[in-house]
Image (spheres, coloured by chain):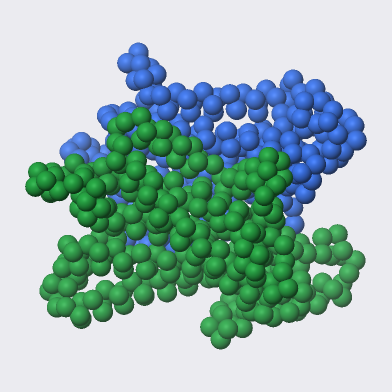
Amino acid sequence: MTQVATLPEPLATVAPPRGRHGSVAWLLWVARRLGLAVLTLWLVSILVFVATAALGDPVRAILGKDYTADKARAAQLSALLHSDQPLVERYLHWLGGLFSGDLGTSLASQQPVSELIGSNVVNTLVLVVVSAVVMIPVAFGIAMVSANLRHGRGDSIIQVVLLTVAGLPEFVIGILLVAIFSTTVFHWLPAVTISSSTGHPWDEPKTMVLPVLTLVLAVAPYVSRIVRSTLLEVLDSDYVELARLKGIPERVVMRKHALLNAMVPGIQVLALQLAWLAGGVVVVEAVFNYPGIGKQLVDSVNAHDVPMVQALSMIIAAVYVGVNLVADLVSILLTPRARTAISS
Amino acid sequence: MSTVTASGLRRITTQRRLLVGLTITVLVVLFAVLGPLVAPHGQNEVVGPPFSSQGVFGTDYLGQDILTRLMYGGRIILLIALLGTAIGMVLGILIGVVAAYAGGWWDEVIMRLNDVTLAFPQILLALVVLTAVNQPKAWMIVLLVGVSHAPRVARVSRGVALGIVSRDFVYAAEALGERRSRVIVAEVLPNMNAPLLAEAGLRLTYSIGLVAALGFLGFSTDPGVANWGQMINENRLAMSTQTWAVLAPVLIIGLFTVGTNLMADGVAQLAQRGDG
C-alpha cells in the first residue's frame, strides 16, 4: 500500500535560479524549499484543525447517548475544547500553542498531550529507523541480484514475488507473519509487544522482530523494483558498455558504474517510502500493539480525543514533509547536472 | 477503455500477469457478489458455541459461521472500494487535466495545493475526519477514500495530459474555435486511456487495502453487517484458538489486492509497449 506511482521530480519542480553565483544561489534554493515546506505545514494545520474540529461535534461523539443526559460533562468537555469561541479564534489559539510547545490537554486522560506522546514518539522513531536500516541493503541487494539475472528465469521469479508482496496491504502482511511465526505454524516470536517497565519495546528485542519485518516487507518491493529498472537502463548505456570493453569484470561494473548511477532514483523512491512509513506505522503498530504514535493515534481517534489526534497528525505530517525535503536536497547533491544548474 | 477487438483480446491473453490478475480479481468479485446467495447460514445467525470447529472454517467469537460471514463480508468492501476509486479517479483526472490544459499560473497554484494534500498519508486523512464522527456511514468512507486518492491521481493525470495538450490536434481544435471544456472532453481525455486505466487498477488495490484497514482498526460502517476487515478486528484476540476466523478474511483480502495489483501492472506494461 504505497504511492509509488507519484515519484517526485525534483529536477522538474525546482526551477533553479539562473544568473546568480555559487553559495548565494544555493542559499536561495534552500530558502525556497524551506519556505514551501513551512507553507505546506501551515496549510496542513488548517486541514487538520478543520477536519477534527469543524466537521462534526466531538463532544457529541465522545458522550454518545449521554450527550443529552449529562449536561455537566458536556459543558466541561466543551470548555476544554473552547467550543464556545469562533472557529478562527480557536484555530489561532491552537496554532500558537503548537509553536510554544503547548499541545493542549488530552480529553481522555486530562493530562497534557506533550507528556503523553513523548516516549511514544521515540518508540515509533526507533521502529522506523531500524526498519529503514534493515530495508535499504535488502532492497538494493535484491535489485542487484535481479538485474544480474536479467531476462532469465530467476529475474522473472523475483519480479513476480516482489509484485505479489507489493500488492498486499501492510496489516495483511503483519497478520500473516503473526500466523506463521507466533500463533499457528511456529511459536517462536511474541505476537504483540509486551509492555516493559521502561515502556520501551527494545528492552525485549524479540518483540521488535515482527513489526520491523512487516515494515520491511511492505516497503522493500517498491524500492527494489525501481532500483532494478534503473539498473537495467544504466547497464544498457554506452559508458557501461565501454567499461566492459575495457575488460573490467562485470562485478565491478555493477558496483562502480551501474549502482552509483542508479542511486538517485533509488534515493527518491526510498524517501517516498520512508515518508510513507510515517503513515504505514499507524496500521502496523495497531497490529502488533506497538506502543508508538500510530497505535496512540488509532486509540485517540476511537476515543474522539481531538487534541491528541491534532498533535499526532501534525507530527506525522511534519515527518512526511521533512523526509521529502531531505530527499530533494540529497538527490540534487548527488546529481552533478542539477548541482551545476543551481550554482551557475 | 479501448474497444475489445480480436487483436486486443490476443494481446491481453499473451500478457500473463494481466490474465492471472484478471482471473483472481473476477473470482474474488464473484465470491463477494454471489456469496450471500449461496451462504449456508444467515450472517448474524448463531450456529454453535463460539470458536468451535463446526462447518468449514468453524465459528467466530459469537458462534457465527465463519464461511458465511466471509461470503457476506465482501460486498460492502467491494462497493466502497469501487465507488471510492471512481470518485478519486474522476476528481483527480479533472484536477490534473485542468491544471495541464490551463498551464502557467493556474497550473502552479493547483499543483502546489495538490502537493499539500500529498503531505498527508491516506489513512491519516480518514482517521482525522473520523475523530469527530460517532458512527461512520458508508458514504463517508467512500468520500474519504475518493478524496484521499484524488491528489495522487491528479499528479499522474497531469503528467499524462501535459504530453497531449501541446499536440497538433489540440491546437487544431482550438483554432476551429471549440470551447475549452469541449477540447478537454473530446480531444485530451480520450487520448489518456491506457495510463489512466493502469492508475485506476492501482487505486483500486489501495482502496481495498484502505477500506479493509479501516474495518480492521474498528471503524466499520455498520457493526451488524459482516465485513472482512471488521472480522479480523473482532476475532484477532483469539487468533491462537480459532485461526481461521482471522486468517480467512486476511487471505481473501490479500488475494484480492494481489489480483488487482497484478492486473494494474499488466495494463501498465501494455500501455508502455504500445497504444494499449
Chain B drawn colour: blue
Q: Position of residue B223 (x, y in %)?
A: 78, 44
Q: Which quarter of the picture shows residue B115?
A: bottom left
In the image, B182 versus B215, the foreground residue is B215
State the residue at coordinates (72%, 69%). A196
Q: Which chain is green?
A: A
In this picture, residue A111 sits left or right of residue B103: right
Can residue B94 be seen here? The reply is: no
Can residue A173 be seen here? The reply is: yes
In the image, A293 versus B2, the foreground residue is A293
In this picture, residue A82 sits left or right of residue B13: right
State the residue at coordinates (46%, 33%). B262
Q: Is residue A178 above or below residue A84?
A: above
Q: Is residue A76 above or below residue B40?
A: below
State the residue at coordinates (15%, 48%). A248
Q: Position of residue A152 (x, y in %)?
A: 32, 31
State the residue at coordinates (65%, 25%). B31
In the image, B236 versus A320, the foreground residue is B236
In the image, B48 versus A146, the foreground residue is A146
Q: Position of residue A184 (x, y in %)?
A: 71, 41
Image quarter (top left, top right, bottom left or bottom right) of the C terminus of chain A: bottom left
Q: Is residue A260 above or below residue B206?
A: below
Q: How many marks?
A: 0
Residue farthest to the bottom?
A100
Q: Position of residue A259 (x, y in %)?
A: 26, 53
